[in-house]
Amino acid sequence: STYRQLEREGIVENFDLFQQHLIVERNANDSNRLDVLFPPDYVNQLRVFAVLNQFRLQYSEEAA
C-alpha cells in the first residue's frame, strides 16, 4: 500500500492505527465523488504533505 511505502521511507508511522481510523466512503449526494478521511501519523512533526492525484476514467489498452 502507499502508506506502507511512506512508512518505509520514514515519512509516516503506525500503520495499524492509520488503517483503523481511515474512512473511505462514496458521497451520498454525488456518486462520482469519493470522500476520504486520511489520518496519517507523520514522523517528526512533518506538517506539509503534497499529493499529485491523477484520475483516469479508463486506461487505453496500449497502456496495459
Image: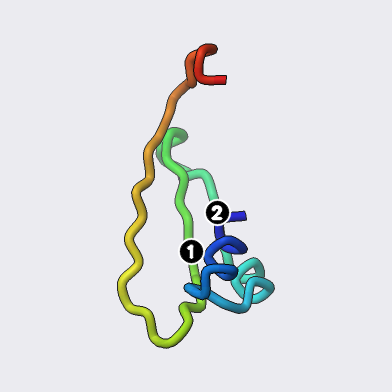
Amino acid of disc 2:
Val
State which quadrant residue 20 falls in: bottom right
Q: Secondary structure at mark 2?
A: strand
Q: Could you give the CA–CA distance between mark 1 and mark 2, rounded to whole angstroms?
A: 8 Å
Q: Residue at x 42, y 40 (%)?
A: 33
User: Which residue is most to the front?
Assistant: 9
Is 6 rendered above or below residue 57?
A: below
For label 1, count other residues whose C-alpha is less than 10 Å away and answer few (under 14), some (14-19) or many (20+): few
Q: Residue at x 33, y 78 (%)?
A: 47
For label 2, count other residues whose C-alpha is less than 10 Å away and answer few (under 14), some (14-19) or many (20+): few
Colour mapping used in the image: rainbow
Q: Residue at x 43, y 87 (%)?
A: 44
The disc at residue 58 is none
User: Front-most of 31 and 16?
Assistant: 16
20 to the left or right of 42: right
Residue that carries the numbered disc 2 in the rendered image: 24
Q: Quadrant of the C terminus?
A: top right
Is 32 rendered above or below residue 11?
A: above
Residue that carries the numbered disc 1 in the rendered image: 38
State which quadrant residue 30 falls in: top left
Q: How many marks?
A: 2
Q: Secondary structure at mark 1?
A: loop
Q: Residue at x 49, y 70 (%)?
A: 39
User: Which residue is most to the bottom?
Assistant: 44
Q: Quadrant of the N terminus?
A: bottom right
Percent of width and height locating residue 45: 39, 86
